[in-house]
Image (spheres, helix red, strand yellow):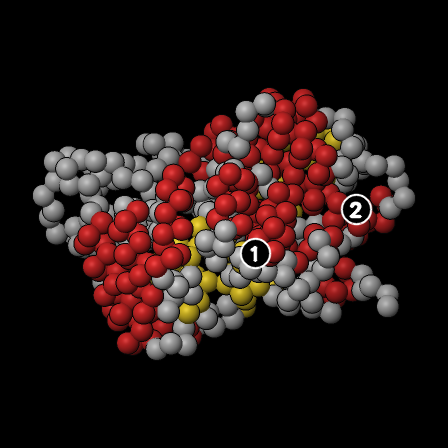
Amino acid sequence: MKRRSLLGMIASGALAGVVSKRELAAQEKVARATRGMPSPKIKDISVINTQPGGVRLTVVKVTTDQDGLYGYGCATFTQRADLVGPAVERYLKPFLVGKPADRIDDIWQACYNSSYWRNGPVLNNAISGVDQALWDIKGRQAGLPVYQLLGGKCREAVDTYTHASGAEIPQVIDRVKEFMSRGFRHVRVQVGIPGMSGYGGRGQSGVVVKKLHDSPVYEPAPYIRRTLKLLEECRKQLGDEIELLHDVHERISPIQAVKFCKDVEQFNLFFLEDPVSPEDIAYFRQIRSQCATPLAMGELFNSPHEWTPLIAERLIDYIRIHVSQAGGLTPCRKIAAFAELFGVKTAWHGPADVSPVGHAANVALDLACYNFGIQEYSPFTERLQEVFSGCPVMKDGYLWANEAPGWGIEVNEAAAKKYPFREHPLNAGWGEIRRMDGTIIKQ
């Protein structure tokens, strides 16, 4: 059966509003021109830093020696964004210029080992930018979306969850109802703690908590009590049809996490995320032995030493890795295959601090991996789409892939320059949150 041309697809409306006819024509021209040519070589590597929304985004562009053949990759590490660019331009670029652009796994392995010490977030994000850009190039060469290069679709579209939060429990429930009316079947719920800095929920103004410092304050016990009330009310008012998720964000002690996971079992969560920090993952053995609450973990993981035992021992149900933190598409497709053997599903990290290129990589994995579980969703704002055209399309709670070659995304570099990194008192790093006595907490 003859494959429909990209221009034919856009004319029929299959890609309407996603990418322009001019962009599709250019991509199809590149695909035709490069078929049968010698392997492209890496000619240049550059970094695009932009902040069209609230967070700093880093995208790597790899240009080849074949006219019009290039690709984009996500290297976003918002909290240390200023370090990723030099890692790419001062270390990876001189190492890679002149190498064949079609040897993706070989290049990944070479970059991974080139610094000797490895598995750090700055290096992993830099490698990810290059790695994803090479996959984009491969797709543009083939005239196919990246998910087709991974074996094709296991499903038609990607089921997602979104975030409902509020200072008060009724506000959260009203927000969930709004998302349900828009077709979402999975919603993460978070509520504020009076007078405190609760993750994912706004605190109440005017409530004073006695503390021995000037930083935002948080205490685990009030958080636990309030969250249990939130989940109880959600089930009473929303019923069992909606899938509920919740993120602990590692802010409680391991033994509190063991009990909390047992206490929320009655509310039939879709999953409970990050009950303990990466430093305490051995406690997952104790949690698993105590309850059947579905568990998700991995947002902060950088190293195989973190995710391998959790997957191999079946101690979690969903792996939550931030794809660029792990080094890009190449390692994450291997992680997904490894997890499939042990019945662990994917739930790649997908908040606003992932560029649209990174979201497209998530969607490619979601479509092509049999053990897909759920995808975190963050909306693509108008300003974001001014810089990045061809973002995946949201409809009725599902993300649909752009069917253009590669990621299907083009970066308007002139528009990106309109939104440089903005000044931030902590250079976009996480602030301090402390217990009442001043002890810093993990987050």
Label 1, residues with CA under 10 Å away: few <14, some 14-19, many ≥20: some
- In front here: 22 or 342? 342
Q: Residue at x 29, y 66 (%)?
A: 231
Question: CA separation, marks 2 and 1?
Answer: 35 Å
Give the number of callouts.
Answer: 2
Question: Cβ–Cβ below 8 Å for labels 2 and 1?
Answer: no
Return the x and y of residue 429 as percentages of the image width and height: 37, 35
Image position of 281 (left or right of 415): left
Q: Amino acid at mark 1?
A: Phe
Viewer-side residue, 165 vs 112: 112
Describe residue 273's horizontal placement relative to residue 229 as left or right.
right
Q: Which residue is mark 2?
A: 141
x, y (%) of residue 238?
A: 33, 76
Question: Which quadrant of the figure has residue 368?
Answer: bottom right
Seen at 61% across and 66% down, the residue is 157
Q: Vertically, is 177 above or below 87?
A: below
Counting residues from the start of the chain, the first of labels 2 and 1 encountered is: 2
Nearer to us of marks 2 and 1 is: 1
- Amino acid on which disc 2 is placed: Gln
Q: Which residue is mark 1?
A: 342
Q: Nearer the viewer, residue 156 or 280?
A: 280
Q: Residue at x 48, y 41 (%)?
A: 306
